[in-house]
Image (cartoon, grey):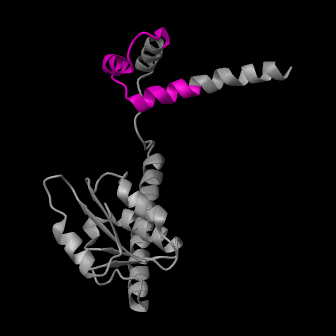
Amino acid sequence: MVIGYARCSTADQNLDWQLDALNKEGCERIYQEKISGTKKDRPELGKMLDALRAGDTVVICELTRLSRSTKDLFELVERISNAGANIKSLKEAWLNTTTPQGKLLFTIFAGVSQFERDLIRERTMEGLAAARARGRKGGRPRANSKAISQALALYDTGTIPIKDILETTGISKATLYSYIKKRQKKTAVPGALEDDN
């Protein structure tokens, strides 16, 4: 089956040109949505990916309609490929896994992208090693221990909204929940041992 995917960012934008192009290409089913491409959760895209069967071909008008980044593109194409399906972009001729040349080109681009990611990782590790050799530690600065203690005490009252705790202490929601989890793990271990006895 030839399946089309059309997307535009806002309700004000129009999908007509994409729908016309996809219909002209012979798409038997078209998934369409008006949602920002920066959002990871795109419901119609998810439905399309879940519905893919071996031998299907996904057609898009251009890459910007499908992916948020190069990494996102390669993940989506890999998922399409794992379903035994192909993908074809009407604007970017190199993205057409229905032909041997298209598969080769995509493999080359994917290899270059992986090479770039490996280089970035390597440079980062080298930079961290050099910083450690000079006595500096990488990573995010640790949260203020007084602020953490205050936040946990406020949380324990059970009466103060999380939003107010965060505003009062200046710590992030992720940090607060991380410390709550750590504390729960510490208290859960002795309890589990007592139950076994």
> Looking at the image, is 99 positioned above or below residue 152?
below
Instruction: Name the residue at 41% across, 28% down.
Output: 143
| In-front residue for pair 25/178 | 25
**In which quadrant will I find the N terminus?**
bottom left
Q: Residue furthest front?
A: 28
Q: Main secondary structure of the magenta part?
A: helix
Q: Position of residue 90 (x, y in %)?
A: 26, 80
Q: Does the magenta stretch include residue 40?
A: no
**In which quadrant will I find the C terminus?**
top right
Q: In which quarter of the image is residue 92?
A: bottom left
**Residue 113 in view in this figure:** yes
Instruction: Name the residue at 45% across, 26% down.
Output: 176
Q: Give the range drawn in magenta.
A: 156-182
Q: Position of residue 70 (x, y in %)?
A: 34, 66
Q: Is residue 167 magenta?
A: yes
| In-front residue for pair 160/130 | 160
